[in-house]
Structure formats: structure tokens, C-alpha cells
Amino acid sequence: MSGAAFPDYRGRRVLVTGASGFIGGHVVAALVKHGAEVCAVARRKGLRLTGVDQVITADLGRPGSARIVVERARPAITFHLAGYGVDPTERESALAERLNTGVAAELAEACATSRDGGWQGQHLVNTGSALEYGVATGDLIESTIPQPTTRYGMTKLAGTRAIELVALRDGLRAVTARLFTVYGPGEHPGRLLPSLLQAAREGASLQLTGGAQRRDFTWVGDVVDSLLRLGLSSAPALGVVNTATGVLTSVREFAERAADVIALPRSALGFGSLPPRSSEMSHDAVNIDRLRAVAPPAPATSIEVGVGLTYRAVSGR
């Protein structure tokens, strides 16, 4: 992360769903570092998280469970990072609707009912997805009409809208940080950077698509900083805030620049040996003016620095 200080979280009760996941784990570590009293929600029993005050084991797939979790934790602010459908093996439509839409709505309702009157920041920070925009064209600004084509994008968008309805109706301070291509330590093994790191370790080549699709690659430490900054905003009805760098990079260029950092020969990158995947998103530029206005500064870690930090973290160097 940037090394920014967030003293306003010290001593505050903070609930984090998806605490054992990629981004959730980094959010928990940051909150612990800044002195928050973290209550983490996890699906499996026996999960141990360093510095966490309480771990609540809950199956958020069960209707009503999110409300019970909020009632138990009584948080000043909730960071919602649990979701379903990012992993290619997660393909159950009913679970996607429940975990991406139903849980978001339940959390918003529960946070509106049991909010901490002494907390001046957001009551709920939800994490959205670039896939909510789907095939929308042109520069992606928060007012762009979403056109999701995947089950994940559709259900995440429905969750975003459910939170917005509660915020407008009940005065809940809530924000959805719409994330793009986040990378860093703890990513799923099948994603691009972990695959590059594995190829470097094994001295192997890596099969890739042509890599022409463009994305906004954002280092996870920057994303966490932005989430914490958004959480401290006292603005009502923030709605959606694009959370990214505002810079597009093709998958090919990212892979090549990352390969240079981790000493993987570019000749090992087998561009074009795999066909493009229909679910892969390629989009136009991401407008981050709102993020700059509400929670500056915007993410700015370069690909070389972000990959280098990730490489050292996963290799123990």
C-alpha cells in the first residue's frame, strides 16, 4: 500500500465480508494495521486471521444470514467483498443471484437499521465489478448505462442497485467501488500474473491469447487505500465510484512488462496459442474523475512497481 495513515479507523468496529479472499485479506490487514477492531466473516470454521478481533463463521448463501452477522458485529462500517462467480468454477446461477444480489441487499437493510450514529463515514462500502458495464462503449463514467452480458456482471449490478435503493430510501451512506483488473499477492492461481510467476519459477513457457484486449490494471495495495478513503467520506448517496488508474494497458503489454520484472524471457510468452475467451472483457478508458474528487489520490502504482512488490511478497524476497 501507499503507506498512508488512516487514524479515523482506530478503535472502530469494522465488519469485512469475504475476509479470506484476495482483496478482502488485504483490506483486513490494512484495517488491523490502522488499529480498527476488525470482525471478519468467513465461510469455513477455524479460520485464523492475524490481529482480527472476531471471526464470524457464516454461510451468506442462506437468506437472513447477512442480517444476523451485522446484528452480531454492530459495526460502524462494513466492507462487503464477498462474491460469487470470479472463479471459473463458480457457475451456479442461483448462488450468484443470492451472493451477489441478495446479500448486498440484506447488508444494506441491516446497516441502515443498526448504523452507528457516531460514525461520520460511509456505513457500507460495497465492491462492484467492471463486468457490470459489460459491452458498454466509450469512456466508462459512472453515468454510463451498464450493459452486462455475464451472470456475474448482471448479479453484481443488481446488488449495486439494491444498495442504492436502500441508501436513497433510508439515508444510508453507501458507496460501490467499481473495481477493474486488480492484481497482487493472493490472486487466484489461474489469473494472468500468478501464471506468469509460475512460468518464471518453472522456467516454462506460457500459453496466452493474442493479448489485444485492453484493461485497467490496478495494484491491490492502491485499491485497498482507495476503499479505506472512500469509507471515510461523509458524503451521502455516493453511489458508484470507478476505482482504477484511468490508464489502459493491453494484456500483451502487461504480460511483457511483468515478464521483464520477474526475469521471464519474453520468448516464453506464447501469444496467440489460446483462443480469446468470450467472457473476457475489453473496454474503453475508465473515467476516475469522481474518485479523484471524493477520495484522492487515485491509484498510481506503475505495473513495474506493482509486479515487483507482488514478486517479492510471493517469493519471500
Image (tube, rainbow, N blue to C red):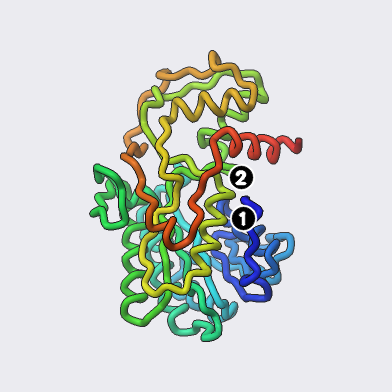
Q: Which residue is mark 1?
A: 25
Instruction: Determine the residue positioned at 61% across, 21% down.
Output: 264
Residue 72 in the image: above or below residue 5: below
Viewer-side residue, 151 vs 34: 34
Which residue type does callout 1 highlight?
Gly
The 10 Å Cα crowd at callout 2, few under 14, some 14 to 19, many 20 or more, is: some
On screen, residue 228 above or below 152 = below
Q: Is residue 311 visible?
A: yes
Q: Viewed as shown, does residue 119 lie left or right of 46?
A: left
The circle drawn on residue 273 is: none
Q: Earlier in the sequence, mark 1 or mark 2?
A: 1
Q: Which residue is mark 2?
A: 186
Q: Position of residue 223 (x, y in %)?
A: 52, 52
Q: Residue 154 lies in what quarter of the image? A: bottom left
The C terminus appears in which quarter of the rendering? top right
Q: Classify mark 2: helix, strand or loop.
A: loop
Q: Viewed as shown, does residue 31 lie left or right of 256?
A: right
Quadrant assignment, res 105: bottom left
Above-or-below relation of 47 to 232? above
Q: Residue at x 44, y 53 (%)?
A: 243
Q: Position of residue 216 (x, y in %)?
A: 43, 41
Q: Residues within 10 Å of mark 1 (few under 14, many from 20)?
A: many
Q: Position of residue 208 (x, y in %)?
A: 46, 24
Of 260 and 25, nearer the camera is 260
Q: Tell me the amino acid under the disc marked 2.
A: Gly
Question: Residue 87: x, y in percent?
Answer: 47, 45
Instruction: Determine the image quadrant of residue 118.
Output: bottom right
Residue pictured at 51% horizontal, 67% vertical: 231
Closest to the observer: 167 or 8?
A: 8
Q: Are marks 1 and 2 in contact (CB under 8 Å)?
A: yes
Please report the residue visible at 42 percent of the width from the left and 18 percent of the height from the top. 273
Label 1 to label 2: alpha-carbon separation: 8 Å
